[in-house]
Image (spheres, rainbow, N blue to C red):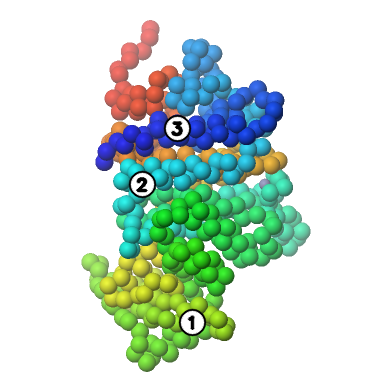
């Protein structure tokens, strides 16, 4: 692990500043007490420390010492009042923040950190998953999705489709820009997610014209319109395909299997469980006349006492054979890893933050979500590349929660010149005698 200069905390913070300042330039003649940069960066710092009281505590340090950590560590010129920060951020276009995501990915690429994420044939696996980050019966804005329960109660939601670069063997994940599922997308959940999915694919291709991607997603997406969009963007796919959604496909698979045309592989692991792989290439995705030809594979695990403990099936454009089927299954399963381990943290934090920060009347809810996602992204990059961050996290603290408690407390009560100085202090705190 090497500390790459353009991947250090300060470099990433400067990249954020540069983008935030550019948004500032786009505002025309608006009368504001606080520069937009300071509002956005203060919001980011709150998410970075997962601390809703951050502005209050920094103002106290400022009042006493005429300097504060938001200034020294995050380059915030003037600490905004919380209500004013919310008012300002409500009018920020979430699209204006988006360029930060490809910028961070390019930095990882230049720092030789991205190559380790290559999955099959130099392609990057992008897990695409719908997720809800806000739900309420009371609070809402014009961008909310609305559902009506049987007794007529309305519930308001915000949902996104979140693409994330994952590798089955790497703990850290790299988020790409999220796509809002909007209330103009359609009436059915499926329409909404598939339309957002199409926009998302186009956006990823536009931001990264040269990278090779495999899109992996759940059964909602293994439909012709989405697959056509993926192909048009010159990407590959591994998509869950369930028997209930794909009757014709499974009839073909079963018939070809009976004819002995299916590939098979069985491996036994160290716990005496049998891993069973099966595949058939070139079968029609559905029963329509112009159906796509896809390749099919399925996988199940049989425990020592002969119970099926896992079972799933996928379609892909990659030709499946004995040499790659194990990897393809790993790829198809990688999205669960994101859902279960990593992304849950963020989603739960998202809920937490919603309650503390407010919803806004325009974009506030999504702007906060994006700042939260960027804070998460910076944590992931620092875990991957920053030796000091890594050392403090893993030698001093047993859990992420403990680590963040300590970061929050230290940042609240002491003044530092830099992020690195703060980490060094936590790693090796000076002994201070109590007064008296
Ligand atoms: Zn809303």
Labelled pair 1, 3 in contact (Cβ < 8 Å): no
> Residue 112, position in %: x, y?
31, 46
Labelled pair 2, 1 in contact (Cβ < 8 Å): no
The residue under label 3 is 13
For the point 46% across and 49% down, the residue is 175
Above-or-below relation of 430 to 3: above
273 horizontally vs 235: left or right: left
Q: Earlier in the sequence, mark 1 or mark 3?
A: 3
The mark lying in front, picked from 2 and 1, is: 2
- Between residues 185 and 54, which one lies in front from this camera angle? 185
> Residue 254, position in %: x, y?
43, 87
Extreme residue in the right direction: 152
> Residue 435, position in %: x, y?
38, 9
Picture disc at residue 92: none
> Residue 208, position in %: x, y?
45, 52
Per the image, label 1 sits on a secondary structure element best described as strand
Per the image, label 2 sits on a secondary structure element best described as helix
The residue under label 1 is 284
Spatial distance from mark 2 to mark 1, Cα to Cα? 37 Å
Asked if the beta carbon under badge 1 is closer than 8 A to the nearest atom of ligand 1, the reply is no
Badge 1 crowding class, 10 Å Cα cut-off, few under 14, some 14 to 19, many 20 or more, is many
Extreme residue in the bottom direction: 259
The residue under label 2 is 109
Badge 3 crowding class, 10 Å Cα cut-off, few under 14, some 14 to 19, many 20 or more, is some
The picture quadrant where one finds residue 289 is: bottom right
Q: Earlier in the sequence, mark 3 or mark 2?
A: 3
Per the image, label 3 sits on a secondary structure element best described as helix
The picture quadrant where one finds residue 326 is: bottom left
Q: Is residue 218 visible?
A: no
The mark lying in front, picked from 3 and 2, is: 2
């Amino acid at each position: 692990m090497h500390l790459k200069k353009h991947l250090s905390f300060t470099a990433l913070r400067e990249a954020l500043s540069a983008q935030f300042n550019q948004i500032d330039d786009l505002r025309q003649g608006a009368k504001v007490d606080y520069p937009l940069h300071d509002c956005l960066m203060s919001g980011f710092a709150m998410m970075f420390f997962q601390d809703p009281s951050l502005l209050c505590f920094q103002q106290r340090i400022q009042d006493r010492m005429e300097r504060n950590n938001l200034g020294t560590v995050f380059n915030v010129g003037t600490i905004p009042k919380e209500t004013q920060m919310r008012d300002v951020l409500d009018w920020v276009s979430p699209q204006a923040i988006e360029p930060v995501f490809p910028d961070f990915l390019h930095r990882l690429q230049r720092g030789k950190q991205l190559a380790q994420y290559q999955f099959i044939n130099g392609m990057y696996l992008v897990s695409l998953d719908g997720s809800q980050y806000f739900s309420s019966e009371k609070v809402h804005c014009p961008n909310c999705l609305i559902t009506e329960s049987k007794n007529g109660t309305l519930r308001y939601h915000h949902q996104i489709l979140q693409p994330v670069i994952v590798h089955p063997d790497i703990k850290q994940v790299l988020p790409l820009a999220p796509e809002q599922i909007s209330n103009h997308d359609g009436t059915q959940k499926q329409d909404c997610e598939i339309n957002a999915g199409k926009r998302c694919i186009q956006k990823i291709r536009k931001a990264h014209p040269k990278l090779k991607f495999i899109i992996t997603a759940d059964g909602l997406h293994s439909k012709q319109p989405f697959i056509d969009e993926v192909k048009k963007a010159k990407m590959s796919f591994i998509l869950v395909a369930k028997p209930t959604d794909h009757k014709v496909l499974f009839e073909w698979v079963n018939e070809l299997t009976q004819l002995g045309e299916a590939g098979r592989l069985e491996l036994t692991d160290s716990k005496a469980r049998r891993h069973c792989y099966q595949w058939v290439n070139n079968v029609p995705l559905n029963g329509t006349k112009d159906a796509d030809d896809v390749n099919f594979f399925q996988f199940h695990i049989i425990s020592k006492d002969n119970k099926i403990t896992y079972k799933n099936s996928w379609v892909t454009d990659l030709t499946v054979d004995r040499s790659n089927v194990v990897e393809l299954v790993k790829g198809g399963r990688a999205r669960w890893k994101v859902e279960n381990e990593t992304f849950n943290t963020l989603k739960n934090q998202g809920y937490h933050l919603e309650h503390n920060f407010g919803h806004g009347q325009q974009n506030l809810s999504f702007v906060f979500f994006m700042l939260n996602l960027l804070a998460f992204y910076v944590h992931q990059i620092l875990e991957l590349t920053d030796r000091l961050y890594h050392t403090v996290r893993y030698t001093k603290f047993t859990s992420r929660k403990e680590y963040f408690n300590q970061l929050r407390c230290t940042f609240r009560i002491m003044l530092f010149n830099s992020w690195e100085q703060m980490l060094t202090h936590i790693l090796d705190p000076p002994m201070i005698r109590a007064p008296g």
